Amino acid sequence: MNPKRILVVGAGHVGLYAALRLSKKLSPREAEVVVVDPQPHMTYQPFLPEAAAGNISPRHSVVPLRRELRRCKVVAGAVTRVDHANQTATVQPITGPVREIRYDHIVMAPGSVSRTLPIPGLHEHGIGFKTIGEAIYLRNHVLDRLDVGAATTDPEVRRSALTFVFVGGGYAGIEALAEMEDMARDALKYYPELKPEDMRWVLVEATQRVLPEVDRDMGAYTVQQLLKRKMDIRLDTRLESCVDGVVKLSDGDSFRADTIVWTAGVKPSPVLDATDFPRDERRRVTCNPRLQVVDGDRVVEGAWSAGDCAAVPDLTGPPGAYCSPSAQHAVRQAARMADNIVAVIHGREPVNYRHKHAGSVASLGLHKGVAQVYGIKMTGWPAWFMHRTYHMSRIPSFNRKVRVVVDWTLAFFLKREVVALAQLHDPREEFVEATPPVR
């Protein structure tokens, strides 16, 4: 029997966990698992705020694919087209000619990208918060703005440098805002020229609440805690323009800001536009509860999907409900999908995915948090501890778990690193200036 080829598109939460489980449950005689992703690592996104704030090393929030997926074939490149009718994917490696990969089963798990709006100036001045590169950049940028604020004698320049705007009040926005403010406040101990009240931290949220995944009272508690830290919380407010760094809000306010972070939602990866898979009105791949791709009532044989890019029915919710785009669902969907693929290869029937959302945890900075798990609500230090414990247990590999715990342990005894490494973003600048062109 020729081994089946299983192509996994994307190595995020779904792709990595599914490939790892498939490679353990299927022998090389039964299947070959091929993983395609442009990045050589999986980013554990819940740790991005802690990596940006310097609580853990950025490298410890990512999982190297080749170390973790030793039984899989890893292709560093981007899938540019999927022709499922002919069970062929076109892949552009990071270098070299385009190649075609034939497969028997495909796992579409390219994840999501930032969902932006056509706001003037956002393209030029905004930054997202979905990748480790964006987290590192934001950390360096915030610390660099503190240096600018401390060095300048111009009050307008200082005010603009020390104004930080975060758009979006979901988990990504709240955690990024809280962790970065916590880090910057810590760093001010080394800036005698600056006072905490010189900084302005602004949250812009289009709805009337934050953290929609938890009950309203927990969202209200979060807002109260941020207000106690003198943050500027704008609910039911939209960003209308940020041309030339001038932030204009729907409530009529206008001010300059050197830092504009966009965390207002996600949308399915544009990779799906180059496939022949059926999509719903939100451009997600349509799936049944077994995580098989479906076209209406017809199962698309050999095609599977899960995570942010898939519309997976939530069997624990009301009719018509879909699973939320969270890591909690993605990890469990990956395991169920891998088991279903193994079942199909072995001639058995796949099983429905069913998981009742356990709740959510969020960090609001060092020793501060909010949590709602199985109906139990916690705030402050207990919630922060639960947040760390849960995510430490979920990050893949014993290697990463140990490194993260070591980072946290050292942080109890050593002061936080608050130095900006801005040269990372343009490392050749000094060398280019020192090297005259040859004429």
Image (cartoon, rainbow, N blue to C red):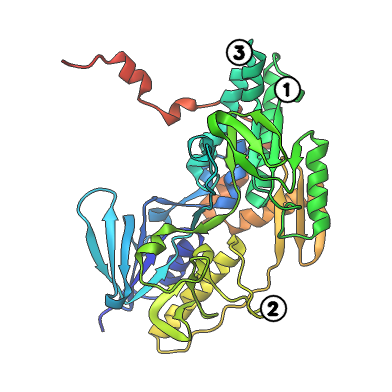
* Helix, strand or loop at mark 1: helix
Name the quadrant containing residue 260: top right
Q: What residue sits 71% from the left and 29% below the top?
A: 200
Q: What residue sits 27% from the left and 55% below the top?
A: 92
Residue type at mark 1? Asp
Q: Residue 195 at what x, y percent from top left?
A: 74, 20
Q: Nearer the viewer, residue 375 or 438?
A: 438
The residue wearing badge 3 is: 151
Q: Which mark is residue 318?
A: 2
Q: Nearer the viewer, residue 152 or 351?
A: 152
Is disc 2 surrounded by few (<14), some (14 to 19) or many (20+) residues within 10 Å? few
Q: Nearer the viewer, residue 291 or 167?
A: 167
Q: Residue 361 at what x, y percent from top left?
A: 71, 55
Residue type at mark 3? Ala
Q: Residue 331 at what x, y percent from top left?
A: 55, 65
Residue extending furthest top? 153
For marks 3 and 1, the one nearer the N-term is 3
Vertical side of 297 occupied by 125: above or below = above
Vertical side of 299 occupied by 200: above or below = above
Q: Nearer the viewer, residue 295 or 410?
A: 295
Residue extending furthest front? 252
Q: Residue 378 at what x, y percent from top left?
A: 81, 55
Residue extending furthest left? 439
Name the quadrant containing residue 251: top right
Question: Does the image show residue 350?
Answer: yes
Foreground label between 3 and 2: 2
Q: What residue sits 53% from the left and 49% below the top?
A: 116
Q: Which mark is residue 198?
A: 1
Q: Are marks 1 and 2 in contact (CB under 8 Å)?
A: no
Tell me the CA gap for discs 3 and 2: 57 Å
